Amino acid sequence: MMIPLMILALFQGADPDTIIARAAEKYQRISSFKAEFRQVIADSMIGTYESRGVLVQSGESKLAMRFADPQGEAIVMDGEHIWVYTPSTTPGQVIRLKVPSDPTYGPNVLAWILTNPAQRYRARYIRSDAIGGRAVDVVQLTPTDRSLPFTDAVVWLDQYDNLPRRLEIHERSGQRRTLALSGVETNRRVTSDTFRFDVPPGVRIVDQ
């Protein structure tokens, strides 16, 4: 008995390993990624922290998360250093770190999910869903590598462009991070100034 092509495609589309592999391939091919973000970090010790802003990425070592709320805050990866400027919680200083050789251990949560997923995670298909009128596949990822910075993640992947629209991550620190992405643009020209962090006057640099 022949299986209708539409039904066969539905079965194939629900394979989590294929979905994640397709997303990782697309992510590695794009020259730039830009989106508005809303982030919620929930911690049993410090409570819930909400923020929003614009995220821009170009390659593995350049990232800018510039916050509209809290206004003026930023996490910038310029290719050599990571700058973490959060005056609402640590006024008067900016933390400077070296960019790690493996993007999975940097601040880019997209890289956490989409760098070598076949070697790092067990994937489980949860359901088909929709975000902002766009069809998405919802996939759960469980790391097989205990050195990764999270213990569990659920990712909503757009069925058209294969890129994330929402991530829920349970980090090893105990925090739960939810990152929602909208207005996604890829392969746009990005100027070098996007990934430059200018230290504000009176702010000291703390190297870590």
Image (cartoon, helix red, strand yellow):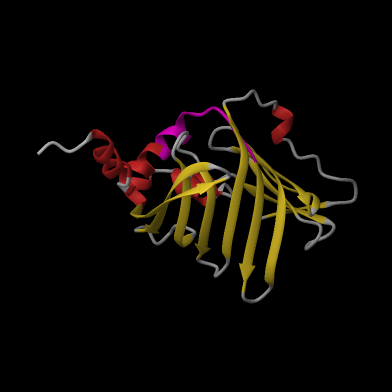
Q: Is residue 101 visible?
A: no
In the image, taking residue 8 as reference, residue 200 lies left or right, namely right
Instruction: Give x and y (percent) for residue 95.
Output: 72, 53
Q: Is residue 12 visible?
A: yes
* Residue drawn at x 81%, y 60% as measured from the top left: 88
In the image, taking residue 106 as reference, residue 3 lies left or right, namely left
Q: Is residue 24 magenta?
A: yes
Q: Is residue 28 above or below residue 188?
A: below
Camera-side residue of 128 and 201: 128
Instruction: Give x and y (percent) for residue 65.
Output: 68, 44
The boundaries of the magenta stretch are 23-35
Instruction: Give x and y (percent) for residue 190.
Output: 66, 26
* Residue drawn at x 74%, y 47% as measured from the top left: 74
**Which picture quadrant has residue 114?**
top left
Q: Disc count in the image?
A: 0
Camera-side residue of 81 and 149: 149
Instruction: Give x and y (percent) for residue 70.
Output: 79, 54
Camera-side residue of 57 and 48: 48
* Residue drawn at x 46%, y 29% as measured from the top left: 29
Q: Is residue 2 above or below residue 132?
A: above
Q: Is residue 125 above or below residue 103?
A: below
Residue at the farthest left position: 1
